[in-house]
Image: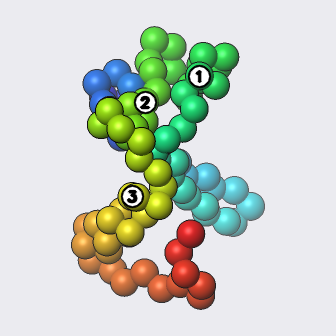
Amino acid sequence: PPPFTGVWMGDSKLCAIGVHCGNHITSHGLALNCCTDLTWFDHIVPCGLEGKGVTSLSRELGHHVTVDHVLQPFLDSFQEVFDCTLVFSEGPG
């Protein structure tokens, strides 16, 4: 939900997206929760957001979803959305 970054399912974050700038270097990344053990989030305030939760693809879809299941479709969609070609020095993953 705006103004929060990431991918959300209702009030629960499914994917964190971040950018860091410092020392003349910019880095970015994302964390897509596929089959994450969500009990670890019971001990923290995820992303510093009081009253918001965390979810995973496995929880939302009701069956076990691994990174291997989503990696290629994710990369294909990334290329399509950003109109680019990803190049790997080794195989992805």
Q: CA distance from mark 3 to mark 2?
A: 16 Å
> Of callouts 3 and 2, which one flags the residue occurring earlier in the amino acid sequence?
2
Q: Which residue is mark 1?
A: 39
Residue at disc 3, secondary structure: helix
Left or right of 32 on screen, residue 11? left
Residue at disc 2, secondary structure: loop
Query: Dot 2: within a 10 Å radius of its alpha carbon, few (fewer than 14), some, or many (20 or more) residues?
Result: many
| Residue drawn at (41%, 47%) of the image | 65
Q: CA distance from mark 1 to mark 2?
A: 10 Å
Q: Which residue is mark 3?
A: 70
Q: Is residue 82 shown above or below 5?
A: below
Q: Which quarter of the rendered picture does the C terminus lie within?
A: bottom right
Q: Amino acid at mark 1?
A: Thr
Q: Amino acid at mark 3?
A: Val
Count of labels shown?
A: 3
Residue at disc 1, secondary structure: helix
Can you give x and y, in whole percent of width and height, for residue 35 in the image?
A: 49, 41
The residue furthest right is 23
| Residue drawn at (43%, 63%) of the image | 71
- The quadrant holding residue 59 is top left
Q: CA distance from mark 1 to mark 3?
A: 22 Å
- The quadrant holding residue 39 is top right
Q: Amino acid at mark 2?
A: Thr
Can you give x and y, in whole percent of width and height, for residue 66 in the image?
A: 47, 51
Query: Dot 3: within a 10 Å radius of its alpha carbon, few (fewer than 14), some, or many (20 or more) residues?
Result: few
Q: Which residue is mark 2?
A: 55
Can you give x and y, in whole percent of width and height, for residue 73 in the image?
A: 32, 65
